[in-house]
Image: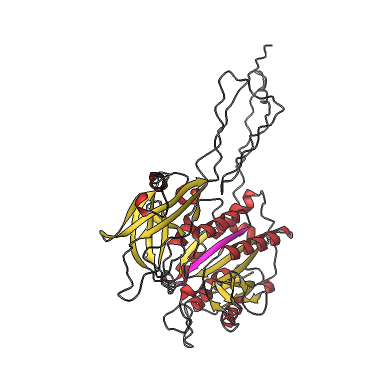
Amino acid sequence: RIFVVFRIYAKVTPHTGMGDFNVQLRGVKLKNVEGLFKKSDPFYEVLHLNDGNWDTVYRSEPVMDDLNPTWREAKVDLAILCDGKLASPIRIRIYDFEKKGDHELMGEFETSVEGLISARAFAAGGDVNDTESAAAFNVTKKGRDAGQIFVMRADISGVEEPAEEREAEEAPPAEEEAPPAAAAPAFVPAVAAPPTYAPAVAAPPAFAAYTPGAYVPPPPKPTFVDYVAGGCEINLGIAIDYSASNGDPRQPGTPHYFSGIEKNDYEAAIASVGKVLGSYDSDHLHSVWGFGAKYGGIMRNIFQCGPAPEVNGVEGIIDAYRSTFKTGLAMSEPTDISEVVEAAAAKASQAQSAGGQSYSIMLILTDGQITDVNKAAASIFKCSKCPMSIVIIGVGNGDFRAMNFLDDMKCGRDIVQFVPFNQYRDNLHALSKAVLKEVPGQLVEYFQMHGIQPNPPVQQNEDEITFDEEDDGVIEFSF
């Protein structure tokens, strides 16, 4: 026998395409769109080109009554901003802020992360307050000049520089010395460790006769129905947007307006979508939270709606929603969903760890005017490993580009489904199909990722099966 020993040397270079992009912008002589006696309140959005669509990935705070605004420094994850590709096109749009959410476009320009960094480098060594020393981007609206944007800061942080190349003749490190672990870039899952070496199985001897055996097909992949039939508990929670961008609830035409005759936009969405998702909830008890309001002058990004921690059925959700307006809240800003997302994830993980199989659905109803899309995306990414799905319902006819971005972003396990309610409000069947488009697959994906198979089907007696004939032509069964 001859044994051959190979020794392989490998050089590992840390991935340097991710990190955080730090940027600060300043507007100069922006075109006023407020009329003769007022000044615009500019804010800007950063948009990323994704499959042919421009999706909002960051929104700044507005600077009030100022046509020469200097916005606060922003930090945006490069994985979300441009997939780590610094030359990818990004678009920056400047809007005039309106409390009702119907922000008016002031102008826009297109560039890239590299372009912003180059603009700042052009002015290196100069006074950042001296606009003449910085490279400017011309803002246009319908082909006409609408001002200029200067780059006060543009750099990348949070990326580990690769080690200097070792010379070819340098001996490899001793086997007992483990290389230092590289810090993982933001929002990028750690690379799995290489598999343990296993010797190859020896081939059967040449004289062994081949005996064909019966073909055994692989077991079918479990389905959503298999998990539900096996007793997997589905828990539905609701979060409602009470932020000022919804407008004055006392004014007709706003999403929260109570006419006393028909349901407002939020009530209609709760009644329709709650009926679709609530039918899967095991005990029909739901947590109802609100966000985007102040109590006693203190901003609350999550608070309980109604007097009880949980309510019973869709009517209980609507009662809790209505009663919250009688608790002394003040509709305010910012609109931040990150805290309700993380609270729902913690509750979902606790329910799953309690034993048995449990999966949660978080229903978020909002007008879509999220203040910090990047912060929301980071929270969703952090919670993507939890046993939950997020269904975002866009209420009204606002700007839902940020919601589409959260639905389409490819970071971690996909757990978000966005549905614009007005597009389906007159067709319950189409609404049900849109709302449930991704949830079943997300549930199966979570349990399969963790090696959890469906339990055997739970046997029930006929007297344990109830049905609701509330709607003409529709019979909903609840097991």
Q: Nearer the viewer, residue 77 or 271?
A: 77
Outermost residue to the top: 1
Note whether 250 is above or below 232 in the view shown.
below
Protein image colouring = secondary structure
Q: Report the magenta residues as a range.
A: 383-395
Please state the horizontal and vertical placement of residue 71, each as a whole percent of the image.
45, 60
**On the image, which quarter does residue 295 sit in?**
bottom right
Note whether 162 is above or below 439 in the view shown.
above
- Badge count: 0
Q: Is residue 11 left or right of residue 91?
A: right
Specify whether residue 387 is painted magenta.
Answer: yes
Please state the horizontal and vertical placement of residue 136, each as a whole percent of the image.
34, 52
Q: Is residue 205 left or right of residue 89?
A: right
Specify whether residue 128 is painted magenta.
Answer: no
Q: Is residue 259 left or right of residue 278?
A: left
Outermost residue to the bottom: 260
Which residue is depicted at the point 47% across and 70% down? 367
Please state the horizontal and vertical placement of residue 379, each as a whole percent of the image.
57, 58
Q: Nearer the viewer, residue 144 or 472?
A: 144
**On the image, which quarter does residue 91 sit in?**
bottom left
Q: Quadrant of the N terminus?
A: top right
